[in-house]
Amino acid sequence: MLKYNQLGVGRYNLLGKIRYNSQPPQRQQPLYSRLSNALLVVYDQDGNRLGVLENADDPILEQEIGSVDTLTFSLPYNDPKREYIQNENIIEVVNQRYFIRDVSKVRTGGRLELVVYCEATWYDLQYTEPMKVWSWQDATPEQIMSDILDGTGWTVGRVEVTERRNLQLEEGLTNRLKALRELPNVFTGELWFNTSNNTVDFLRPEGRDSGASIVYRKNMKEIEVNYSTKDLVTKLYLYGKNNMTIEDAHPEGLPYIENYQYTTKKKVLIVKDERFTNPFHLYERGMYALSILSRPTASYVMKVADLSRMSGLSHEQFALGDNVFVYDKELGINEKKRIVRWKYNIKKPWESEIELERPQPTLSDLLSGVQEAAPVLESEDTVDRQDLLNLSVFNYLMNSRADDGFNYWTNNGWEIDPVNGYSGNASFKATAEEGKTKTLKQIVYPSHRDSYSISMRVAAENLQVGRGRVGVYIRIKYADGTEDEPIWLSLAGGETI
């Protein structure tokens, strides 16, 4: 005879012995996938879903790339789910999460309601424990972000920017969010916070081509356009600390740079920034700054309708950061612009307001991204000035001293010598074998320079090559897919590829 759950004999779920779900509960999947007309979902502070706020009114997202991210809405006071609207509970909008920060009771026209203000969960990064790392040498954004986020419950997501910098963080700074938000201008990238999985991306400032068009009388109700050349500059003289010029870094040895992409008129600006002690850093940031300062600023603010939920118009969906086409025949506007800020009405998407591009940043912002009122990140000059005259300090080769094993390298037959390094403890080593080719390969992604230097130290004493050869094989491939003829730099043996 089969017996089940006999008390004292068959025992199940003994507390402390048999444990189920001992790990923290997994975050539940979002209920909605599209922002337009999505309902707000409320969770408690532990992430347990409490309910859907189907009666929430005027849910408006106000967001700006890498900056503002808030949600406001109202709820009838007699709504049975009013009890869920408690400070620090979580509101989910599709895959974005917000903490309830302010709850107000308001009477309007005889109607009593709750007015709720929420902040994106990443705002709490400003309230975390102080950082353990304050400075970085020749570091990528990914390395710096990893140190800033360490111990916060957030991690580094996708990073597209690979440039390196020597950076010093103001010691004693406890606000990690403030430190993160200084990175975009220092490295020319954008921060994107993913509240669904607590990761932070650092991407190049290039929008996704959504395919959406904003056309007057179709989905555009109002538009305000402003063009300005008040601060346009075409020639820029740059000086750093102690009147350091950019001549050592300029390919032609000039103390200025020029850009006449919009007008041939010469509009000169002379700038001195004491924060720069490295002419190569100043030159590179100056080139970026002038590429923006040498064209007119254009800003567009418009009221639009999101038509993507209508039948046959799913291609008209757009989001913050996307590129959209703007067309107004009467104003002569037919341009592709990027959404940099919006106030999106989730319940009434036809009453949304978007801003395309933005007012011109200051030259100081463009040069270094450090605000005068509160400098957080500063470039350091750790290389002797005489060395700078001969070599750019940017090293695009990763793990070039074998300090981190074969990370970043594709290895075929090489070894790590842990004791015979030159500028570090270790080095790469290859022992010749008859009839075998041994290679060590790395792909690098340089910036916008016109020329590069390749340097190495090779221990080749008493090297006998025989019929083989030793050297460096270089392939240069461009973004459009074309390639230059391969280059062979011979160290010993054969001279050609």
Image: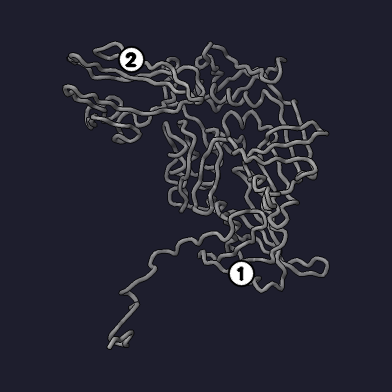
Q: Could you tell me the amino acid type at mark 1?
A: Tyr
- Mark 1, residues whose alpha carbon is within 10 Å: few (<14), some, or many (≥20)? some
Residue matched to label 1: 84
Q: Is residue 300 above or below residue 308?
A: above
* Of 301 and 287, the residue lying toward us: 301
The residue lying at 58 percent from left, 34 percent from top is: 369
The answer to which quarter of the image holds residue 270 is top right
Q: Is residue 49 above or below residue 182?
A: below
Residue under numbered circle 2:
489
| Marks 2 and 1, how far apart at CA | 69 Å
106 on left or right of 251: right
The x and y percentages for residue 362 are 66, 31
Say which residue appears at 72% left-offset and 62% top-offset.
57
In the picture shown, does residue 403 fall above or below 133?
above
* Relative side of 410 to 87, left or right: left
Tell me the tag on residue 193.
none
Residue occupying the point 83% across, 67% down: 109
* Disc number lying in front (2 or 1): 2
Residue 384 image offset from top left, x and y in percent: 42, 20
